[in-house]
Image (cartoon, rainbow, N blue to C red):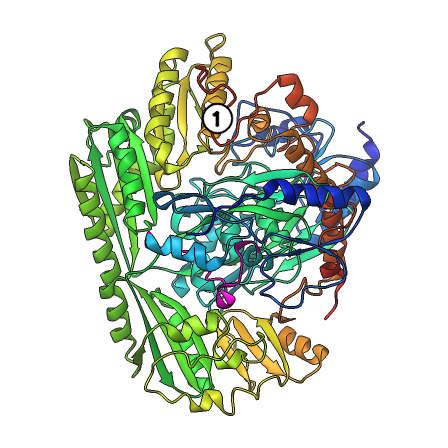
Amino acid sequence: MRNPRVINLLREQLSAGSVVTDTHALTPFETDGLTAIRQKPWVVALPETVKQVRAVLRICRENRVPVVTRGAGTGLSGGARPLADGVLLTLTKMNRILEVIPQARVARVEPGVPNAKITEATAPFGLYYAPDPSSQIACSIGGNVAENSGGVHCLKYGLTLNNVLGMTVQTLEGDELVLGGKTLDAPGYDLIAAMVGSEGMLGVVTEVVVKLLPEPFAKRVLLAAFDDLRRAGDAVAAIIRGGVIPAGLEMMDALAINAAEDYANAGYPRDAAAILLCELDGTEEGVNADVEIVRGILDEAGAAGVSIASEEAERENLWRGRKAAFPAAGRMAPDYYCMDGTIPRRELGDVLTEIAILSERFGLPVANVFHAGDGNLHPLILFDSSKPGELEKAEQFGGEILKLCVARGGTVTGEHGVGVEKLDAMCAQFADAELDQFHRLKAAFDPEGLMNPGKAIPTLARCSELGGMHVRGGALPHAELERF
Amino acid sequence: MPSDGDRSEPLTAAVAAASETGRSLTIVGSGSKSGTPNGSETVSTAGHEGVVDYRPDELVVVARAGSHLNDIESVLADSGQALPFEPPLFGGRGTLGGAVATGLAGPGRPWFGSARDALLGVTIVNGMGQRLSFGGQVLKNVAGYDVSSLMAGAFGTLGLLLDVSLRVRPLPETSLTLARECTPDTAHRLISDLLRKPLPVTATAYCGGVLRIRLSGSHEAASHAAAGLDLDLEVEDDLFFQGVRDHTHPFFSGFHGSTPPSTGGTSTLSHASEAGADSPAEGSGRLWMLSLPLGSVFDEANTLTEWASARIWWRTDADADTVRARARVAGGYAASFPPRLADVAPAVRKYMGRLKAAFDPAGILNTKLLSHAD
């Protein structure tokens, strides 16, 4: 499959050093954030201009070479895993902020711009870009578009989809699609909705217009401790029912609290079964009113203690613990496997309890630290890959958690994407007719199937071989049988 | 409460039957948005109504597409919630499916998002008569392509909507509408200023020489923000923005059948100018919807400017090319009203056509809406 002519063609179009084939130089590209899966690409192309991106796509199409698009490589589902016979189209050199228009509250950027750089560039105007995935210092906006990335502020401010107004997409056939713009609405089908979260399967995004928001006047973070996990879960639903939409509403269980304390010393109560971190933002008066409402709800929900951080330093400290939870988990065990399912909030208490039961059954500890406000779980399964069979056991455990999410009316991925990791889990969430519709949608953009082939949507054959059970909205066949 | 009627089976069967014979179908809800093409067989979602699932603490409602917006809004209001995108109710005749399929949003759009932003899941019948479900009841869901969002604003050309799952928002404790007579220049300056501040603004409108700003939230937040504006503003109730949302404001008269124009608002400010020079005589001109960047300047007579100047309603006799060119120069685009799948660049049209074929290979669902040019 490897036609050496392709390398020469790429070298003709790209600048020196932008076509990488040396086996050592390829090493950093062999994996994304899902490091358990590795594969060296045949060649890495690092274009600097749109014209070069178009050239790479033309060469790939003419020579029938599959192409995997990659941003910063922080994805957590293997969506950017290279192909042994494919081109890895890496957009990190396209990292310019092209335009900031404070008046219209938009910024126009290249796909390789790191998420956090947008806020950095717009902060002087009192504006910021809302979606803030944990990897925001490194992850690129193009990757955010591919994965529809979230973060801790989704409940109030939405995901990437809700914060992107326009984009330019190059298709494999050489068409340039200018979608949306600086306006709120655009004519025609909402192709932006098709592109966002499409994991590089439909086209290559070469420019993004993002929506900016004015920095809120006031922010407060409430820390509530609970003696009981279920009570904390119920408090989450009570806050939402109370008519308040927090900017962030995060939950950590005892294992995660203690790991974070060991690591970051954020001042969390070590004896709590769970804590909630609730961030409220807005005008001074609005936030004061919301703090009173939320405090009342937390007390009523049986919180063992509630403290409020108003000063920036205190708030930062509380968030530091939360943000350190993942590296902290890394110190608890040689390896951890981060899951990413979403469930309706009302199921939080039950699902956390069932995860604890599964944890005992598999003999692997789990730390829970997650976006409670939008029901997005991130159970961290702790294991040791040097012990024979533990990786497989962790993966199996993870699979069970995802099935549980689907059975409770949720989804197998809230924000990390399907990639290669959750192909099997997709069989549980979707029936053949829906998977088939996904495949037809892909073919509309990429009839030759050369864009990131094999990712995101499982083939019908794969699902039928798995004999996977399709469950939807709790309508599990023979729900009385114990399974998960 | 909406009456409970599940017509999923007959609706699916109707599309499946048409699919076999290749007969074209026109999907109708209540027929509240005029301009749907006639001539082909119709399939109506009327009677396919009712709330399937509503849990206020999940901020999600699942309802059948033929449900009347009024019924849905009243169910939500009982729990202190509302549809975020404030779809026009069109005298209560509008359906939920119609609101999603046309993607029309009301005055709060820049702050509350669009129909697509609220849409969490759909059950559709595609052009092959297959019943498919995408998305669900959770906000964060990136499993597979976002087919549900694609349905918003697709005018039923990709599938007949059976059920939709929508995010809802809590109703604010209070909404204040402030009004002030001012020149277009002053209105522009004030709106630009508002856009830079994180104030609880949830609507703006400039029409007939009067700027209106809606503030929503807790009593303290809204009244403090109102006082802080220091703009010699006058407090009104919410009727004005309801009139804009539902197109019952006199500006829209003549475009929505026999709906009687309401006076909208109880301000002591004069409405004379709105009913006069800046509201053209009934039936004159065409109604255009311009989508421009936030804080835009668009200085034309016979306009109603909302969404922090990101949407301009323009009644004009100017020809379509002129209107489109004006919108383009201002950094946006123009669509006639009632909206259609407007003109797009040839490259985009190519992929729209392929998407249509991916969902409806025989081209039986509302296909005329795709080929229609203004």
- The magenta stretch spans residue B93: yes
Q: Do we see residue A16 in this rendering? A: no
Q: Position of residue A417 (x, y in %)?
A: 54, 35
Q: What residue type is disc 1 on?
A: Leu
**In the rendered image, the vertical position of residue B242 relative to residue A180, given as above or below:** below
A445 left or right of A141 in image: right
Q: Do we see residue A59 in this rendering? A: yes
**What chain letter is assigned to the residue under label 1?**
A
Residue at figure coordinates x 79%, y 50% from the top left: B23
What stretch of residues is rendered in magenta? B79-97
Question: How many labels were placed on the picture?
Answer: 1
Q: Position of residue B262 (x, y in %)?
A: 44, 79
A478 left or right of B58 in image: right
Q: Which residue is mark 1?
A: A402
A217 left or right of B213 in image: left
Q: Position of residue B235 (x, y in %)?
A: 29, 78
Front-most of A473 and A126?
A473
